[in-house]
Amino acid sequence: MYEVRFHGRGGQGAVMAAQALASAAFQEGNYAVAFPYFGAERRGAPVMAFTRVDKDKIFSKTLIYEPDYIVVLDDKLCGLVDVSDGLKDSGMAIINSAEKPEDIKLGKAVKCATVDATTVALETLGQPITNSAILGAFAKATGLVSIDSVVEGIMDIFGNRIGERLATKNANAAKAAYEVTQVGTCQGGFECEKADKWLPGYDELPLGLATRPMETPEGLVGPGSFVDNKTGSWKTFAPIYDPDKCIMCRMCWFYCPDGAIKEVGEGDAKTLEFHHEYCKGCGICANECPKDAIKMER
Ligand code: SF4
Ligand code: SF4
């Protein structure tokens, strides 16, 4: 498995870059997932996005704290947040910068690739949106995905959102960046003064992650409101559980978004119960189960 953490600003397209990389890796026969992490969502605010790629099915759903690669869409972020935090010593930083890798200063000295993705983007897209160009640099610097797959990933993800013509321009930006990426080693020891301000506080979390429990005229909202909202009627497919295959790893219990799975019994007789009044049939439990002990059926 390799894990990539993208650092960008709201509006720079870090999330689409992470998704396009996942799509590129998928074209080459890998499993891949991509997901974002926002603080207070607004244009210009630091954001992160993540891509995990593996030959095998990926069960991990956590944020990426110890990436193999960091990709920085805006080199000014390096002075605001500790982008190399947790980066493995064997890892690599891919940075949008007009400087040489040797002139980049990060928290640790690691392999580093730089590309002036802003200039590439301006020349190919007419806008300083660097998410596609930086993927060309990633392909060149790491060799983990081919530039052809990156182009396919961009066409897949960008094409669906901004149309084929603009996606093709972005693919061209990636190809152009691929040609001018420089690889070397950056300087270490840089201390980022504001690193401790990276994580958002409770009140800054996106709605849905941080809604407080509240009584409203329409009923409960926020944590605990599922008691009033019987979502079981939403489902088309229901989980059918086979206790003989179950090894009680509790992955299904952990990931069920509705708290619809309950552990019952004692000791070796422990088993699971599914609350069909609340289970909305999302199928996450069946997807996460490593033993195929849950099947989704009409
Ligand atoms: S189908 Fe979804 S809601 Fe139902 S038990 Fe599985 S994970 Fe929970
Ligand atoms: S994920 Fe599968 S094996 Fe693990 S507890 Fe749930 S049903 Fe059992």
Image (cartoon, helix red, strand yellow):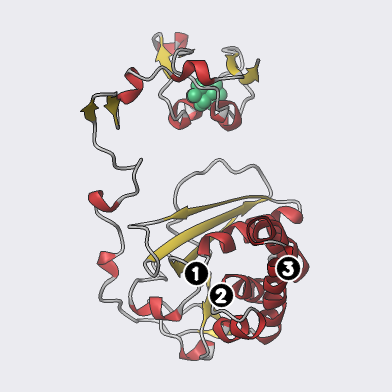
x, y (%) of residue 229?
A: 37, 20
Q: Nearer the viewer, residue 269 or 31?
A: 31
Query: Is 57 left, or right, of 12 in this rendering?
Result: right
Residue 39, by quadrant, is bottom left
| Inter-mark Cα distance, 1 to 3 | 19 Å
Q: Are marks 1 and 2 in contact (CB under 8 Å)?
A: yes
Q: Label 2 is placed on what type of residue? A: Thr
**Residue under label 1:** 12
Give the crowd class for mark 1: few <14, some 14-19, many >=20 residues within 10 Å.
many
Give the crowd class for mark 3: few <14, some 14-19, many >=20 residues within 10 Å.
few
9 up-or-down from 290: above or below: below
Q: Nearer the viewer, residue 276 or 103?
A: 276
**Residue under label 3:** 165
Give the crowd class for mark 2: few <14, some 14-19, many >=20 residues within 10 Å.
many
Say which residue appears at 64% left-offset and 84% top-offset.
Answer: 181
Q: Which mark is residue 130?
A: 2
